Amino acid sequence: MKAEALRLKIWITGAVQGVGFRPFIYRLAVETGLKGWVNNSPQGVKIEVEGSRPQLDQFLARIRDEKPLPAIIHDINVAYDAPVGFARFEIRESDDAGDKTAVMLPDLATCPDCLAEIFDPQNRRYRYPFTNCTHCGPRFSIIRALPYDRPNTSMAGFTMCEQCRAEYEDPTDRRFHAQPNACPVCGPRLALWDSRGNMLAEGDAALRQTAAVIQAGAVAAVKGLGGFHLMVDARSAEAVNKLRGRKRREEKPFAVMAPHLEWVKRACEVSEFEARILLSPQSPIVLLRRRREPDAMTLIAAEVAPGNPYLGIMLPYTPLHHLLLADLGFPVVATSGNLSDEPICTDEYDALERLAGLADVFLVHNRPIVRHVDDSIVQVVAQREMVLRRARGYAPLPLRSTELLPAALAVGAHLKNTVAVAVGHDIFVSQHIGDLETAPALEAFERVIGSFQQAYAFEPAMVACDAHPDYLSTQYARRAGLPVVTVQHHYAHVLACMAEHRLRPPVFGVSWDGTGYGQNGTVWGGEFLVVDDAAFTRAAHWRTFRLPGGEAAVREPRRSALGLLYALAGETAFSDPYAAVHAAFSPAELTVLRRLLERGVNAPLTSSVGRLFDAVAALAGLRARATYEGQAAMELEFALEGIQTDERYQFDLRPGEPMVVDWEPLVHELLEDVRRSVPAGMISARFHNALVEAIAAVAQAAQLEQIVLTGGCFQNRYLLERAIQRLGRAGFRPCWPQHFPPNDGSIALGQLIAAAREHSRE
């Protein structure tokens, strides 16, 4: 007896557009003997298939088991109905109706099959720098609107040739419905310009000539996937210093793009896990410990990362990069194509203007970049991946909520800004935008918000922002004409980590960073918070001290040191016992700073652990002035190299509401070590170990098993790993940021969670 036919309706949500999902469904339906159709919609993928119940059950089971590797399925909703008599299975035109909730997929690194083609002289895509398929290539950087179809991307202006069209329409081809599909006949093309925009070469000649220019020691601006890189020979101190001078970047480390993994292993220590991350579809910059052998040290100029035992390394992730690095055969610095504090350039004509004086030549192409996307940065801590900058390869994959979220926009922090929107059950956190210090940065911030609103036809009902009234993001929120939810900075840090790990209150949050607007008018940054169902309580904090000159102390650790000594010793801080600290200042500077501290004018109180790190680095003689954010703290961490000890400085835990962790005993012991010329590495170890013990002491007092360790200070490997071990031994359950940054890149996520919590109480 023939089994009765049924029609199965399927709605799939998640990252299922731009990954070859419809071709996968087509092949699966044909193999299973089903008829019907599949299409993209603004919500995801819709499928209708007809067949027997066993056929339909097999089809449904295989969707999850055999889905394309980059696809992420959130939900599969099904309903059965009477058959309508489909004649065949087909891919139908996309449906534009309804709310836009589909997930935009991140850009994906070149797959092995495409890589083989561009290096095969017999292949029609030999040395074609825009080769891609359903498994790889541009996604987020080219999408203008949902659903993800070619007319909704920056490839709309390129008409496929007959051969590309045949691939696109062939169900057996891996380019079946690959939206960016192109070849040398019909796709984007390269051009090499001089610094005035005059054409020097086109096509493959442009690529080969760029390699020659870099090899000769010049600076090349290269338009890639999500913006421009500035590239120079990473082996050449002269070339690297030339770039530093032009970019006004004195000491901050540069990222390096290496030709292949084998080269990386010659220069750096690479674990199996780190190698997998380097080779992953995300292909981020990975912070790797540099090998100290003499041969390894010659592979990269010391000027790439002065005084830093780590290198930020990435592998080529587009065909263009693979071809360029293969032609060169050596690593290049690949730093963002911008001036300091400005967003990365995405348009070639804008680049000619903004990068004038920085680059000698410009390798450009005619595929528009819809939105800027920087390289992501990752490090491995406690044998887990920790994303430090979430951009290419990761953004804008959403964080899924079990609850329906209010339509909210979160505008993030002032530094390392990202924004976030809530659409249904999904929280979409933008790519890294950067520091909102300049007019171009603010324009980029507003563009990103606009692009999310356009892509998702999103109209927020409220906007969440930082409590700091002077942040440009906060001022934007105030001008939006919507209900505003202000969120304390360190509370947002804890909520972001809780959301990532799906933690339920109560949670004990250790939130340490450089600067955050405190509820009592002081600068917070060394906070111990208890988060319950309703809000948070400040359970404890580090003892405060003044920062003479306010924000200037961020750039000058010597000021934090002076403020700390003034809190410790008062007027005595300016007497002979502390003469070693005074040497970092001129007499005139000391006079001014003394006046600021005495009067409490332009000398805000802070509990910041970030500034405590700065003070200790200055007192230990490591860094009086910083040329980039976090430099002093990093050098204090680097000083730990080769030091193994459980010795620590003392501190006092003063009872109260909140409790106060008093650093006074710590500073007295530290100063005695400095007086006795104890090496900076031992001072650093004793300081770090004291911080870890302080976390354990306050956790014991709070008596909450679930602990979150977050904030920029926990980018410090030693601090985080020691804290995880110490808390684990004491019976606590520590969590820390992994897929979203511990720094201010996650503030927008936390703000959005705070807005949802507030909305649920109304």
Image (cartoon, grey):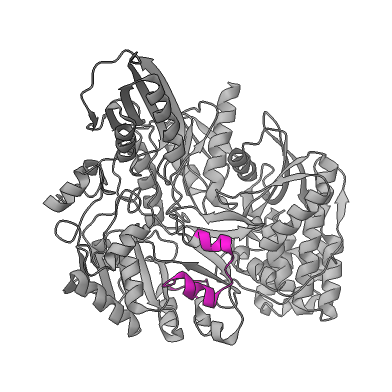
Q: Is residue 586 above or below residue 602?
A: below
Q: Is residue 472 visible?
A: yes
Location of residue 200 by image quarter: bottom left
Q: Is residue 503 left or right of residue 163?
A: right
Location of residue 439 by image quarter: bottom left
Residue visible at 32% across and 77% down in the picture: 327
In the depicted view, which residue is nearer to us: 415 or 422? 422
Q: Is residue 595 visible?
A: no
**Magenta segment range?**
248-277
Most extreme residue toward the front, as rendered?
1
Location of residue 88 by image quarter: top left
In the depicted view, which residue is nearer to us: 690 or 72? 72
Which quarter of the rendered picture does the C terminus lie within?
A: top right
Q: Is residue 226 magenta?
A: no
List x then y, in percent, for residue 662. 83, 55
Q: Is residue 163 above or below residue 488?
A: below
Q: Is residue 257 above or below residue 69?
A: below
Which quarter of the rendered picture does the N terminus lie within?
A: top left
